[in-house]
Image (cartoon, rainbow, N blue to C red):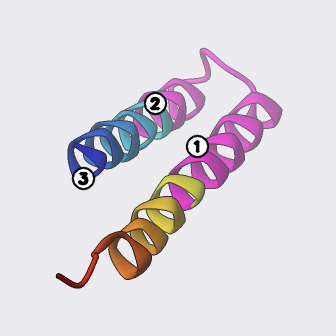
Amino acid sequence: MVRSISFWITSLCILVAVVASLLAIWQFAGTDILWRTVATCLVIGSGTVAFYWINVLFGKTSE
C-alpha cells in the first residue's frame, strides 16, 4: 500500500511540475510561480520517496 501511495504522489508531483513548466514556457504563468511550483513538487516528492525508503528499511519484521 505504501508503495502504491508513494508512486501516485510522486507521479502527481511530476505531472504538476511538467504542466507548470509548460505554462511558464508559453508565458501563461510567471517564472516565480514556476520555481515555487517545481520546488514544492520536489519537496513533496522527495519526502514521499524518503518515507517509502524508511518504510522499506524498517517495515519488515523477522519471523
Q: Secondary structure at mark 2?
A: helix
**What quarter of the picture does the N terminus occupy?**
top left
Instruction: Residue under label 2, please give it.
Output: 16
34 within the magenta span: yes
Q: Secondary structure at mark 1?
A: helix
- Image point (75%, 29%), residue name: 33
Disc 3 element: helix
Q: Name the image quarter holding residue 49.
A: bottom left
Disc 1 residue type?
A: Cys
Q: Is residue 60 left or right of residue 44?
A: left
Asked if residue 10 is positioned above or below residue 12 in the image, the reply reads: below
Please identify the residue farthest to the top as the structure is shown. Answer: 28
Q: Is 58 a magenta residue?
A: no
| Range of magenta residues | 18-46
Residue kind at label 3, given as amino acid type: Arg
Q: Earlier in the sequence, mark 2 or mark 1?
A: 2
Residue at 27%, 47% in the rendered image = 7
Q: How much space separates mark 3 and mark 1, taking CA atoms?
A: 18 Å
